Image: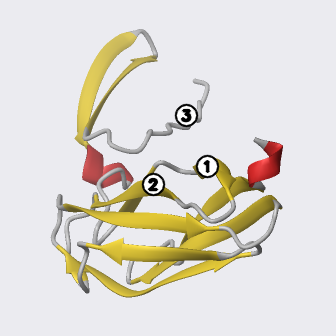
């Protein structure tokens, strides 16, 4: 009799897996709950959308706004300890409906407004520090500032 090894991977969000194996001529089928293979997150889990923020071209003296959605896809409360923003061109202001915690399955919105202070490229990040296993989570920011004469 030959021994066979099988490796099974799950994509995030799957809750059940059906595996059919042919073992020494006998067909068997088994279903395992997703939690048995770790596809259900124990504790909080964060999904940030979009994964990148592009403010586009912004004229100096003006601003551009974008929104970021934070979702707790886990099964425990997400405790948000800090939200920090860095930018190499001007400032990015943040307003949020998130508060300091987010219940399982709940979402909130972070509003970002970029105010460039000189012509050229802007790169930066918004970083969330929380109690999720993959903390901190970072979303890259970018934009391009142009002078009124360049329009």
Q: Mark 3, residues whose alpha carbon is within 10 Å: few (<14), some, or many (≥20)?
A: few
Q: In this view, does 2 lie to the left or right of 49?
A: right
Marks 2 and 3, the one that precedes in the sequence = 3
Marks 2 and 1, the one that precedes in the sequence = 1
Marks 3 and 1, the one that precedes in the sequence = 3
What residue would you read off at disc 1? 54
Q: Mark 2, residues whose alpha carbon is within 10 Å: few (<14), some, or many (≥20)?
A: some
Snapshot quadrant of residue 103: bottom left
Percent x, y of residue 66:
45, 54
Question: Are dots 2 and 1 in contact, CB under 8 Å?
Answer: yes
Q: Is residue 128 above or below residue 46?
A: below
Percent x, y of residue 52:
58, 51
Residue furthest to the bottom = 81
What residue would you read off at disc 3? 6
Q: Which of 123 and 46 is in front in this view?
A: 123
Identity of the residue drawn at 78% across and 55% down: 147
What residue would you read off at disc 2? 66
Identity of the residue drawn at 36% across and 66% down: 110
Label 3 to label 1, Cα distance in Å?
Answer: 43 Å
Question: Are dots 3 and 1 in contact, CB under 8 Å?
Answer: no
Tell me the SS state at disc 2.
strand
- Image quarter (top left, top right, bottom left or bottom right) of the C terminus: top right
- Image quarter (top left, top right, bottom left or bottom right) of the N terminus: top right
Residue furthest to the top = 25
Query: In this orientation, does residue 29 appear?
Result: yes
Percent x, y of residue 34:
28, 45
Query: In this orientation, does residue 77 appear?
Result: no
Tell me the SS state at disc 1.
strand
Q: Mark 1, residues whose alpha carbon is within 10 Å: few (<14), some, or many (≥20)?
A: some
Q: In this view, does 94 lie above or below 54?
A: below
């Amino acid at each position: 009799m030959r021994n066979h090894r099988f490796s099974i991977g799950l994509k995030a969000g799957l809750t059940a897996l059906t595996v059919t194996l042919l073992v020494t001529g006998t067909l068997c089928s088994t279903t395992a709950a997703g939690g048995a293979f770790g596809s259900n997150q124990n504790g909080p889990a964060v999904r940030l959308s979009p994964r990148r923020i592009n403010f586009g071209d912004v004229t100096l003296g003006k601003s551009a706004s974008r929104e970021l959605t934070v979702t707790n896809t886990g099964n425990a409360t997400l405790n948000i300890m800090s939200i920090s923003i860095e930018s190499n061109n001007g400032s990015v202001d943040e307003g949020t409906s998130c508060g300091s915690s987010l219940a399982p399955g709940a979402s909130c919105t972070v509003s970002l407004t970029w105010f460039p202070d000189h012509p050229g490229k802007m790169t930066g990040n918004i970083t969330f520090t929380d109690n999720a296993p993959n903390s901190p989570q970072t979303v890259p920011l970018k934009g391009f500032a142009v002078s009124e004469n360049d329009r």
